[in-house]
Amino acid sequence: METLEFRYPGAEPVPRRAHVGVVASGDLEVLFEPRPGAEALVRVRTSVDGYRAVWQSVLDRFFARHPAAAAVEINDFGATPGMVTLRLEQALEESAS
């Protein structure tokens, strides 16, 4: 089990909380919460150690496209990078609806 933290500049505050995915299914869950300031703080708790560079790459791409200011919590149970991106997109959409 590994916990990673990342920070990104955020120009677009998320309007409300969002929760997508279920970690117990072998997938992952993503939680978005509004956060004061112009920054995204991302905390990843993953069951798979040693993949910091992969997480960095996936999150770099997501926050380059979506500069959301939010507290983001990701609880991972071995999801693929494609699934992580899908869940992040879903959480952002859910937060805006």
Image (cartoon, grey):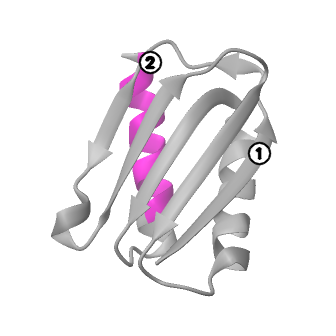
Q: Which residues are magenta?
A: 84-96
Residue 16 lies in the magenta-colored region: no
- Res 12 quadrant in image: top right
- Res 53 quadrant in image: bottom right
Residue 7, percent across and down? 77, 45
Magenta: predominant secondary structure element?
helix
Residue type of the residue flagged with mark 1: Arg
- Say left or right for 51 vs 74: right
Q: Are marks 2 and 1 in contact (CB under 8 Å)?
A: no
* Residue receiving disc 1: 7
Residue type of the residue flagged with mark 2: Ala
Residue at 72% across, 53% down: 6
- Say left or right for 41 vs 38: left
Placement of 94 over or under 27, stated as above or below? above
Residue 93 lies in the magenta-colored region: yes
Secondary structure category for the residue under label 2: helix
Indicate which disc, 2 or 1, sits on the residue closer to the N terminus.
Answer: 1
The quadrant in which the C terminus is found is top left
- How dense is the environment of label 2, judged by Cα within 10 Å: few (below 14), some, or many (20 and up)? few
Q: Nearer the viewer, mark 2 or mark 1?
A: 1
- Say left or right for 95 vs 38: left
Residue 82, percent across and down? 47, 68
Residue at 61% across, 20% down: 35
Residue 4, percent across and down? 63, 64
- How dense is the environment of label 1, judged by Cα within 10 Å: few (below 14), some, or many (20 and up)? some
Q: Which mark is residue 96?
A: 2
- State the residue lying farthest toward the bottom: 50
- Res 19 quadrant in image: top left
Q: CA distance from mark 2 to mark 1?
A: 21 Å
